[in-house]
Image (tube, rainbow, N blue to C red):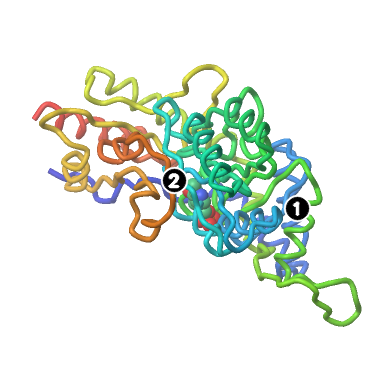
Amino acid sequence: MNDKTYKILLSSPHMSGREWKYLEEAFEKNQVFPKGDNVDGLEKDIRQFTGARAATCLSSGTAALHLALINLGVSRGDEVICSSFTYAASANPIVYQGAIPVFIDSETETWNMNPELMEKAIRERIHKGKKPRAIILTHLYGMPAQMDELLEIAGRYEIPLIEDAAEAIGSRYKGRHLGTLGEMGVLSFNGNKIITTSGGGALISGRKEHCDHALFLATQARDEAPHYEHSHIGYNYRMSNIIAGIGRGQMEVLGDRIKRRRENFSFYQASLQKYEEITFLTEPDNGFFSNYWLTTCLVDSPDKSNKALRLFLQKDNIETRPLWKPMHLQPVFRDAPAYTDGTSEELFNKGLCLPSGSNLTKEDKNFVVDRITSFMES
Ligand SMILES: *Cc1c(COP(=O)(O)O)cnc(C)c1O
């Protein structure tokens, strides 16, 4: 029975203690407002870490996606290509703009957007008289998508691509950081992500204009004048300088956090490889480097389901979670066009996210593997 007095969580915040000095600094300098040295510092840290030319810290990853779409001029009635296998936050900002998401299914190697289906969708939408205005591509669970293929297609049709790298800070494709390969990239520092500021996000880009304009819109679009003058609709999307202090401390340990998440994955994979019914999402080849934000697997057995495993582990105070339910199967998006082949639906039906925090102990992970083994042998 359950000999654990605490719950083993899927992914919980992992503070390092280094966050405090930045918070204290903010208090000492009385920088308890959105702008300030911590925001500047965090933007610099993000640029240095990812190699992006520009970064703007914002109140959330969702806000960053929203501003990215506005930067590209996405407006009412436009169509925007979007990964179907993702979190709703990837798609919601399309609707904020009055635009229409066009969902694309996954391929089986990375679980991310299928390049062939994306091209099919683009051709068909153009044929129908409406060229998609933008592409939002998610790198799910930290795994890089098939970027060469996707960027080639996006480039050929001249459609700007936004990378939703909310789950993928530190992941790389052919050596380059995710979020820096498309026109713009989005990061998230929400509480369950690999590093967290409790809530927050950033827009990164190789084009400084994008980040500058996002900053302008995020601060209520105030024109240059001594009084308050406005010629655009603005937003209050700026990150707080307090929150940014947490981010600076977290950036100092990001390398360690990635290492630990990757170790979690390797440990689960090695410990459970004897069960051919359990397969893991893995890097297809050396060009793909995942931060393994979450370790995800498929349970493919006639008499053992992902749901049964989840409920079995729940009894032992172990939190697991189904994979994201694809957007084209969500009631709220039932009328959106979708180009699907059943892949993400099958992943959803068989998949499970295992406890993946960088703060899991060896004993925690051994216990999880022990309970999964017991489920498989039952
Ligand atoms: C977390 C997440 C977001 C949104 O980020 P927030 O900071 O929570 O707004 C967007 N897309 C994906 C894939 C995410 O996992």
Query: What secondary structure is found at the residue carrying circle 1?
Result: helix
Q: Position of residue 244 (x, y in %)?
A: 66, 57
Q: Amino acid at mark 1?
A: Cys
Q: Is residue 218 above or below residue 7?
A: below
Q: Residue at x 66, y 29 (%)?
A: 176
Q: Residue at x 72, y 44 (%)?
A: 205
Name the residue nearer the viewer: 253 or 297. 297
Nearer to me, 12 or 113: 113
The answer to which of 219 and 293 lies nearer the viewer is 219
The residue positioned 24% from the left and 31% from the top of the image is 299
Q: Which residue is mark 1?
A: 211
Residue 231 spot, x, y in % from top left: 80, 74
Q: Secondary structure at mark 2?
A: loop
Query: Exactly how many numbered labels are in the figure?
Result: 2
Residue behind label 2 places its C-beta within 8 angstroms of ligand 1 = yes
In the picture shown, does residue 321 fall above or below 89? Answer: above
The answer to whether mark 1 is within 8 Å of ligand 1 is: no
Please indicate whether residue 218 sits to the left or right of residue 276 in the image: right
Crowding near pointer 2: few (<14 within 10 Å), some, many (20+)?
many
Residue sitting farthest toward the right: 226
Find residue 58 and report its image quarter: bottom right
Amino acid tagged 2 = Thr
Q: Which residue is mark 2?
A: 86
Spatial CA distance of label 1 from label 2 is 24 Å
- Give the residue drawn at x 30%, y 25%: 279
Q: Residue 328 has which mark? A: none
Residue 229 or 341: which is nearer the viewer?
341
Residue 298 in the image, given as x and y percentages of width and height: 29, 31
Q: Is residue 52 visible?
A: yes
